[in-house]
Image (cartoon, coloured by chain):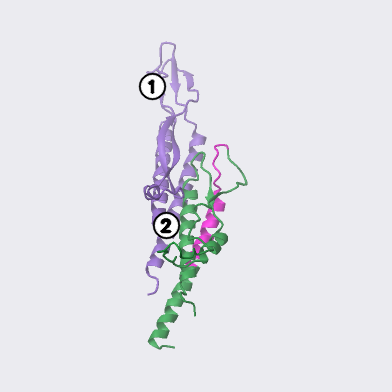
Chain colours: A purple, B green
Amino acid sequence: MALNRVFDIAGSAMAAQSTRLNTTASNLANADSVSGDPNKVYRARQPVFEAVPTFANSLQGEQSAMAVRVRGVIESQAPLGQRFAPEHPDADENGNVWTSNVSTVEEMVNMLSASRSYQSSIDVMNTTKDLLVQTLSMGR
Amino acid sequence: MDINPFAKHAEALKLRGYRNEVLATNIANADTPGYKARDFDFGAALAGARMDGIPLARTDAQHLTPTGGQSLSTRDALAYRVPYQPSLDGNTVESDIEQAAYAENVVGYQASLNFLNQKIRGIRGAIKGEI
């Protein structure tokens, strides 16, 4: 039945959006971290979503129901920040420390977008649950 | 009285359920790069599905082929939505439009359910001899 698959679809979307919220939290927490080695400094992470057919769907060979999957988490290639701070214990031989390339504004936007999308998926799931319950009690 | 008073609403309910799934897919993939939102024309699909009830079994080559109407061929009729504001990542889902369509579809589903419930209540009343 078509309504049952909505739980798979909305559930996968919620899982994907919570992964996005997790990476956002991780990025914001490490926004101010510094390192003396540019290869070790924290770089912003972003999940990449893709649409995949749900399992129940792929059995029947139709492409109507597409769940969301996190294909991977990529690291931002934006340039790192550099600061001259010779008194810093992590500074390199030139007296520089490297700061992460997390953009706090972008992360706040990401957080809002992810939480809105998560809420829409919850709404879809709740509404579908109500419909299913009503359908089950048909004719009572 | 119809031979099968439930047929029309049963088809409508099936189609509403299917559309619910399609729209839920759109909402779920609102942030997926490259995903194209899809939908189908509910009125046309119902008009196509309404013609036939339960298909007759053709056990002999000389039996007539029933014409008009095919059951739930909507999966072929899925079309891509034309976005009002296309986005750079190729995604064509517009959340507000999808949510409006979803709400409309849910109301339609509940309307069909109500009609079915009323019919069942009416028939049960007739059987029991209640007013």
Using the numbered discs, state the Cα–Cα distance from disc 2 to disc 1 in whole angstroms.
49 Å
Q: Are marks 2 and 1 on the same chain?
A: yes
Which three-letter amino acid code belongs to the residue tagged 2? Ala
Toward the viewer: A17 or B7? B7
**Few, some or many C-alpha atoms within 10 Å of disc 2 (few <14, some 14-19, many ≥20)?**
some
Protein chain holding label 1: A
Q: Nearer the viewer, mark 2 or mark 1?
A: 2
The residue that appears at 62% across and 47% down in the rendered structure is B84
The residue lying furthest to the top in this view is A93
Question: On the image, which quarter does residue A40 sit in?
Answer: top left
Task: Say which quadrant the C terminus of chain B sits in.
Answer: bottom left
The stretch in magenta equals B88-110
Where in the figure is residue A8, as x and y percent of width and height? Answer: 38, 50
The residue that appears at 44% across and 20% down in the rendered structure is A98
**Residue B44 part of the magenta-drawn span:** no
Q: Earlier in the sequence, mark 2 or mark 1?
A: 2
Up-down: is B80 above or below B110?
above
Q: Which residue is mark 2?
A: A2
The residue that appears at 50% across and 55% down in the rendered structure is B74
Where in the figure is residue A14, as x and y percent of width and height? Answer: 41, 47
Q: Which residue is mark 1?
A: A40
Which three-letter amino acid code belongs to the residue tagged 1? Lys
The residue that appears at 42% across and 55% down in the rendered structure is A125
Where in the figure is residue A29, as x and y percent of width and height? Answer: 40, 34
Residue B82 lies left or right of residue A75; in this view the side is: right
